[in-house]
Image (cartoon, coloured by chain):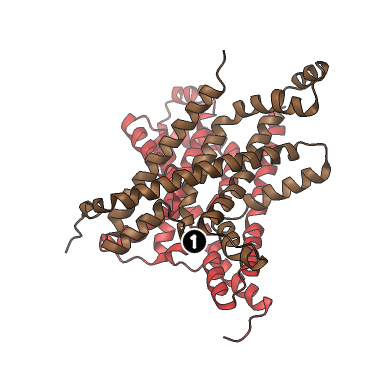
Amino acid sequence: MGNFSYWDILRNLLMAGVWTVALSAIAFVGGGLVGLAVLFLRTSRVPALRLATQGYINLFQGTPLLMQLFLCFFGLAALGIEVSPWVAAGVALTLYSSAFLGEIWRGCVEAIPKGQWESSASLAMSYFEQMRHVILPQALRIAIPPTVGFSVQVVKGTALASIIGFVELTKAGTMITNATFQPFTVYGTVAVLYFALCYPLSWYARRLEVSMNVAGRH
Amino acid sequence: MAYQLQFAEVWPHWEALAKGALYTLELTAVSTLAGVAVGTLGAAARSSRNAAARAIAGAYVELIRNTPFIVQLFFVFFGLPSLGVKLTEGQAAFLAMVINLGAYSTEIIRAGIEATPKGQVEAALALAMTRVQIFVHVVLKPAFERIWPALVSQIVIVMLGSAVVSQISAPDLTFAGSFIHSRNFRAFEVYVVITVMYLVLALFVRQLLLGFGRWAFRRT
């Protein structure tokens, strides 16, 4: 194996970090699309749909993400569908994100004054037209800070994909530790790299929140 | 050939499941106590007049909140021994959870402290209470009352996150699942059962803590 310089460690971790970013992006975009469906169902006028969506959200918010990953990984295999860690991690993180994003966005939709619903209904708009033209454009504004904030949870969540064998930043850290016997340096660097990914997002979310609060006070 | 679900294969291992669930609960209980204590100290530091204390507590919160729990756990379990700190898997799991919950609860408790009306502190000062007395009696208790629901949610999140400690062989509920899986190869059935157990534990812990809050912050 030869000797590993710190540069070798860092370079390998950075290469693996690309997969962390890719998986985060897939989970966030996929979760956003499914989350939009969750939002529509959760705020629907059919009680059964609302109840079913509530159950979906409770299931994902009340169980460990690790179990969700295991169920996707082993469960799909049990159904006879061969899944790579890639697919299992992408599916599990998408569903997980959709439950949280759907619930975050529901709060934003419900923050829109009732009069907006009533006046758009009086213009003979359908539910989807109301959402599309009246409610969502206003809800979008207040939804941005918590959505950016949640993206940090997604990035951190991808670390669990290492457990089902997806080689991203954390898994690469374990592999490099096994080769170099320098856990302190390697996991320290892994932590710094996650911090470099997450902190700007946290900072941006907080700044948006503050600036919007200031705007709301006028 | 279609896959036959065989949950019956899981039941002979009920003892391992019960032990694992108990371990998860115990780990959550002790790390909650220590973590909230750390969070209270952190929040006191964050809202103190000492700039250095504020900066250190702030850096701690940001560092922990912006890195995954599993990396914190691996750092504690695999990384610290090279500094001469040797920990068993149980101790490492406990320490990592305390550090993690400590950071999140620092922010939650701080929000409660900052919402204290100024007049309350001024009134306490007028009664010649010392700074420590004011912090404990006038600031802290109402702060906890305000943030209790948020703190309970965070404790449940930490408990669910503790599934990861199975990766360093701490014998929790997930570890029991992996053990049973290795015996009967019924991965899907085992993890369905484990997932449902976590769901029940989460509901139980949540209701228990909310009930405790109603009792602790009751008006007489």
- Nearest the viewer among A200 and B190 is B190
Q: How many marks?
A: 1
Residue A195 lies, with reference to residue A36, above or below; the image says below
Residue occupying image coordinates x 31% and y 60%: B181
Q: Position of residue A58 (x, y in %)?
A: 41, 39
In the orientation shown, which residue stands out farthest toward the left? B1
Tell me the subunit letter for badge 1. B
Name the residue beneath numbered marker 1: B168
Q: What type is the residue that disc 1 sits on?
A: Ile
Residue B114 lies, with reference to residue A82, above or below; the image says above
**Which chain is tinted brown?**
B
Q: Quadrant of the C terminus of chain B?
A: top right
Residue occupying image coordinates x 37% and y 29%: A45
Q: Quadrant of the N terminus of chain B?
A: bottom left
> Quarter-wise, where is residue B74 in the image?
bottom right
SS at circle 1: helix
Q: Position of residue B140 (x, y in %)?
A: 68, 28
Residue occupying image coordinates x 59% and y 47%: B98
Residue A11 visible in the current orientation: yes
**Which chain is tinted red?**
A
Residue A130 visible in the current orientation: no
Left or right: residue B142 compared with residue B198: right
Residue B173 lies, with reference to residue A142, above or below; the image says below
Residue occupying image coordinates x 26% and y 59%: A79
